[in-house]
Image (cartoon, rainbow, N blue to C red):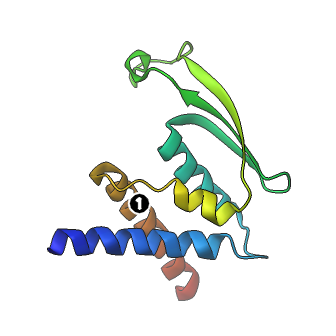
Amino acid sequence: MENSSIRGMVLMEIESLISRSCAKGKMTKSFQHLHQLIVKKHYNAADVSIDYHRKRVAMDIVIDDNSYDPGTVNLNVPTLHANLLFGNLKDFLKSCLDTDNKSLAFYAGILRSYANRDVRLTAV
């Protein structure tokens, strides 16, 4: 029971962070990085670029993880270039949220990172 409440809490908090990051006039570099992280995680993308004015996401999606070796320089990783159009950024990012354990741990790490940034900003 406790496990499902933690899952729900992590999802609720990451959705809240997405909502705050998409508010008008709040687009900081930090929030842009958050958006890229969420899209990269969901699509297994190597590179993500978000054009907020044209409402487009351009990315290189890794097709085969087996050819990726973290110990060497990876020059020939097979990727597929995709250019997606979104109507509402907040809804698009929320649709990218996954509920598996690995993704929830990733989101919890993001939440810790943003909580630490808020603490540093208020402590100064």
Q: Secondary structure at mark 1?
A: helix
Residue 52, placed above or below residue 26:
above
Picture mark count: 1
Q: Which residue is mark 1?
A: 107
In the displayed image of the protein, which residue is found farthest to the front? 87
Could you say where residue 44 lies in the image, as x and y percent from the top left?
49, 36
Return the residue nearer the eye: 123 or 112: 112
Badge 1 crowding class, 10 Å Cα cut-off, few under 14, some 14 to 19, many 20 or more, is many
In the displayed structure, does residue 88 sit left or right of residue 18? right
Could you say where residue 60 lies in the image, as x and y percent from the top left?
62, 30
Residue at image point 58% right, 22% down: 79
In the displayed structure, does residue 47 sit left or right of residue 111? right
Please tell me in which quadrant of the rendered image residue 2 appears: bottom left
State the quadrant of the C terminus: bottom right
Return the residue nearer the eye: 105 or 55: 55
Residue at image point 85% right, 51% down: 54
In the displayed image of the protein, which residue is found farthest to the left? 1
Please tell me in which quadrant of the rendered image residue 93 appears: bottom right
Instruction: Examine the rendering and report whether any part of residue 124 can be seen.
Output: no
Please tell me in which quadrant of the rendered image residue 66 appears: top left
